[in-house]
Amino acid sequence: MIKRHTYEGALAATALLIGAAACGSSTGGSGHAAAAAARKVAAATTAAAAPSSEPDATESPSTSSGEQPDSTDSSDTPTPSGVPLPAPITVNKSVWYGGTKITIGKVTSEREGYSTDAEIGVHVPIVMENLSEVTSSGFPSSSADLAYDDTHLQPTNLDSLSAEIPGKTKGKGELDYTLPQGFDLAKATLTIGTASYQQVHIPFGAGKFVDLKPRVVPMAGKVKAGPITLKFSSAEVRADDPDSADQAVTGRTFLVLHYIASSTANSERVSYEDMTVKLPDGTGAVGKDGTEGVGTPQRSYIQIPSPAPAGKYQLTYTQAYDQTAKAHLTFTMPAS
């Protein structure tokens, strides 16, 4: 449209110049020169106003196929959510629960859609080390609560973490969560276990870290009752029982005694049921679980209050087939 106007304007200007040249011819000899100049201007103006082969800047460009590009193509590309992704969080800490050592790695996140209200998926990588000698059933708890403020989330994939892990080996997995808007991952805490049992707490930011790591208790000695001799090598306080994949109930913990039994009688046996412990306040505790055998390393789990009271403990072993045959061993529990 602009070029058409330019062309018409050029023709009008040429007409005026020709008219001026004509007037000049009637007044004197200079009219010939004016006419020649007018003809040159008209030729130049006509050439400048001639249509060009280049496209008009006001027209839409064509594609190589001659078709116009679809102006709605960009709307087909989803727009990412405006909510920023949480920054990765390097945890790299281990906790002990249900006979499994769980190590948490680097927590990452990703969008689960492209709309403006898209939720955010969080991935918590874990390594599960089976501490027992028998096969375990994967993740050791039915609860892995990720909490911020008053919002509590459970993994969306907990059932998929039930793959068996052979004794004394490791398995990998991850806990997946979907974060609602407003959930501050950097201030969240991961809690494994229900309130009925001793729990572990892993804060992703500030907060109290509770790993329930077993604590060694200095305890060693040899006792004899009837044909049975027990040689104790060590003890530990822990909130889980690897041999049964159990977890101590809230307010209780396990005193685990490590020993080897020997016998001069062929029919003798040694069991955790044959052991009791007197606590510093004079109250007693009995064996809850353990392994049995003679000649090989064994363990006896005594359930005591948590935290373990500091002070002097007395272990009593009573021979199974002769209740009068008893042996005692004292040791000291250090303060936790």
Image (cartoon, grey):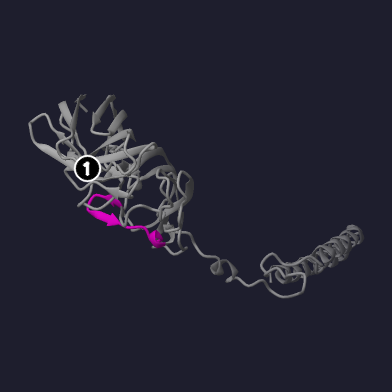
Relative image position of residue 303 (x, y in whole percent) = 20, 42
Residue 235 falls within the magenta-colored stretch: no
Decide if residue 47 is on the left or right side of residue 256.
Answer: right
Residue span colored magenta: 145-159
Instruction: Classify residue 237 by image quadrant.
Output: top left
Up the image or down, 323 lies above or below 118; here it is: above
Please name whichever residue, 200 or 149, is drawn nearer the observer in this view of the structure.
200
Residue highlighted by disc 1: 320
Residue 154 falls within the magenta-colored stretch: yes
Question: Which residue is outermost to the bottom?
Answer: 67
Decide if residue 257 is on the left or right side of residue 76.
Answer: left
Relative image position of residue 21 (x, y in whole percent) = 84, 64
* Residue 298 in view of the camera: yes
Up the image or down, 112 lies above or below 334; here it is: below
Please name whichever residue, 254 or 102, is drawn nearer the observer in this view of the structure.
254
Badge 1, how many Cα within 10 Å: few under 14, some, many 20+? Answer: some
Which image quarter is the C terminus in? top left
Secondary structure under badge 1?
A: loop
